[in-house]
């Protein structure tokens, strides 16, 4: 466990898969893209993490490669979406809903707002980026964000 990071843990609905990691921040971003909504039954609420992840029950993790750069993991037994993963990296976006303790989370950003359907709207005061804006703003550093639509 690192000194600067905070440990988060999570699990799927049936408990066959668990995960934990030392995360740098507790900021949650939401992706409104059509892929995330189809995958997770709503806008995907993710906690970004770069680094090591400890998995339990890894044999129960199914991985769907949804693009050339993105993978989406789920529990093979109960179907819970677990995380989005930037292929070939240690960058993950954990499903906020799968986290055991959600009390310290902060909802800070929405991306792909241009793909958001009209039937819902968050009242939270967040940074809101279109897909193009998100890709442009984040092309330099956090490639995971630009690639979320994948
Ligand atoms: Zn499960
Ligand atoms: Zn998305």
Image (cartoon, rainbow, N blue to C red):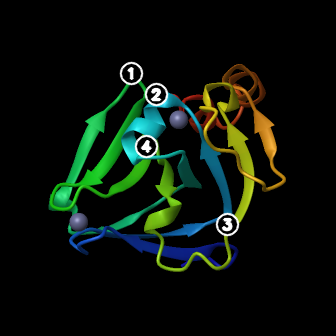
Crowding around mark 3 (Cα neighbors within 10 Å: few <14, some 14 to 19, many 20+) is many
Question: Under 8 Å from ligand 2: the CB of mark 2?
Answer: yes
Say which element carries label 4: strand
Could you tell me if the residues under marks 3 and 2 are in contact, i.e. CB atoms within 8 Å? Answer: no
113 sits left or right of 119 in the view: right
Q: Quadrant of ligand 1?
A: bottom left
The residue that label 3 is drawn on is 26
Q: Which residue is depicted at the point 48% across and 46% down?
A: 42
Numbered disc in front, either 4 or 2: 2
Residue where numbered disc 1 is placed: 68
Query: Badge 4 is on which residue?
Result: 85
**Residue 78, image x and y in percent?**
20, 61
Q: Is mark 3 within 8 Å of ligand 2?
A: no
128 relative position to 39: left or right: right
Task: Give SS at disc 1.
Answer: loop
Q: Between label 1 and label 2, give the one nearer the viewer.
A: 2
| Residue to which mark 2 is pinned | 150
Q: Position of residue 60 (x, y in %)?
A: 17, 60
Name the residue at 41% across, 46% down: 41
**Image coords of residue 15 (percent x, y):** 25, 75
- Work out whether 27 lies above or below 32: below
Q: How far apart are the alpha carbons under marks 3 and 2?
A: 23 Å
For this orientation, the residue located farthest to the front is: 119
- Mark 1–mark 2 contact, CB under 8 Å? yes
Q: Give the CA distance from mark 4 to mark 3.
A: 18 Å
Mark positioned earlier in the residue sequence (4 or 2): 4
């Amino acid at each position: 466990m690192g000194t600067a990071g905070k440990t988060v843990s999570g699990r799927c609905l049936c408990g066959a898969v668990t995960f934990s990691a030392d995360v740098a921040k507790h900021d949650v971003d939401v992706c409104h893209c059509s892929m995330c909504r189809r995958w997770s039954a709503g806008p995907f609420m993710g906690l970004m993490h770069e680094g090591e992840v400890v998995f339990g029950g890894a044999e129960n993790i199914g991985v769907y490669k949804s693009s050339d750069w993105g993978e989406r993991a789920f529990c093979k037994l109960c179907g819970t979406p677990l995380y989005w993963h930037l292929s070939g990296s240690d960058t993950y976006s954990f499903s906020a809903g799968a986290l055991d303790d959600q009390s310290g989370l902060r909802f800070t950003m929405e991306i792909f707002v241009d793909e958001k359907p009209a039937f819902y709207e968050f009242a939270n005061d967040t940074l809101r980026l279109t897909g193009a804006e998100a890709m442009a703003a984040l092309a330099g550093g956090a490639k995971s964000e630009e690639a979320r639509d994948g």
